[in-house]
Amino acid sequence: MLGVIDLPTYLAGLVLIILLPGPNSLYVLSVAARKGTRTGYKAAAGVFTGDTVLMTLAALGAASLLQTTPVLFTVVKYAGAGYLAWMAYGMLRSALAMWRSRGEATADGEASLPETGREERPYRRALVISLFNPKAILFLISFFVQFVDPAYAYPALSFLVLGALLQTGSFLYLTTLIFSGTRLAAAFRRRRRLSAGATSAAGALFLGFAVKLSLSSAA
């Protein structure tokens, strides 16, 4: 179908790829829990844009360039790791502020969350997280090419079909995370310790993503 071969296997692999925890999905869940549904979808839009750019670059051969140019791969790798580490620092600092103010209460008797990330710009952050991940580019090209018929006259169309399926699955998964996040938000507003603990965990995970990326190789 349109140059796509072994579609059932591709769809099965797609489910595993989408469900695999990563900085993109974690950030969307985190921002939805803190800022609500609309802001969650802004972050999701950044992920969709970043994935589209990566899939286009993969189809154009950018992955091969990264693989054959160690210096370029190293620059992109450490830039991405540095950005994730910076985000982890911001989350951990916010969590510390929550811990310090956990005894405060509003006039209604409920703990209120401090305003964190007021200038967060979730679309831009999610876009940068998506783009500064050379391993994602390398993975996309190695995964996609297995399902493109080399004899098909219009390989770009095959990549378009595969990419559309990936984005559809990603949209459904991120939508689930966004609405899960908004439900968590209510609990976070009532329990400052819970919010601080969740933010600390998210910060620690982002720090882990940064370390993992910095230690990765193009091979």
Image: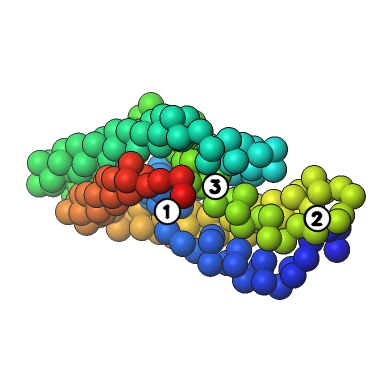
Residue where numbered disc 3 is placed: 138
Foreground disc of the pair 1, 2: 2
Q: Residues within 10 Å of mark 2 (few under 14, many from 20)?
A: few
User: Disc number at residue 54?
Assistant: none
**Which residue is pictured at 38% across the width and 26% down the height?**
119
Of callouts 1 and 2, which one flags the residue occurring earlier in the amino acid sequence? 1
Residue where numbered disc 1 is placed: 22
Given the image, on which type of amino acid does mark 2 rest? Pro
Foreground disc of the pair 2, 3: 2
SS at mark 3 in the image:
helix
x%, y% of residue 176? Answer: 52, 60
Given the image, on which type of amino acid does mark 3 rest? Leu
Given the image, on which type of amino acid does mark 1 rest? Gly
x%, y% of residue 113? Answer: 25, 42
Q: Alpha carbon of mark 2 to alpha carbon of mark 3: how far?
A: 19 Å
x%, y% of residue 189? Answer: 28, 50
Q: Alpha carbon of mark 1 to alpha carbon of mark 2: how far?
A: 31 Å
Residue where numbered disc 2 is placed: 150
Of callouts 1 and 3, which one flags the residue occurring earlier in the amino acid sequence? 1
- Left or right: residue 99 versus residue 13 is left
Quarter of the image holding residue 120? top left
**Which residue is pictured at 80% across the width and 45% down the height?**
156
Q: Alpha carbon of mark 1 to alpha carbon of mark 3: how far?
A: 16 Å
SS at mark 2 in the image:
loop
Q: Nearer the viewer, residue 132 or 75?
A: 75
Looking at the image, the residue that sits furthest to the top is: 119
Q: Nearer the viewer, residue 102 or 202?
A: 202
Looking at the image, the residue that sits furthest to the right is: 153
Q: Mark 1 touching mark 3, by CB under 8 A?
A: no
Q: Residues within 10 Å of mark 3 (few under 14, many from 20)?
A: many
Q: Height in image: 207 above or below 73?
A: below
**Which residue is pictured at 71% across the width and 73% down the height?**
8
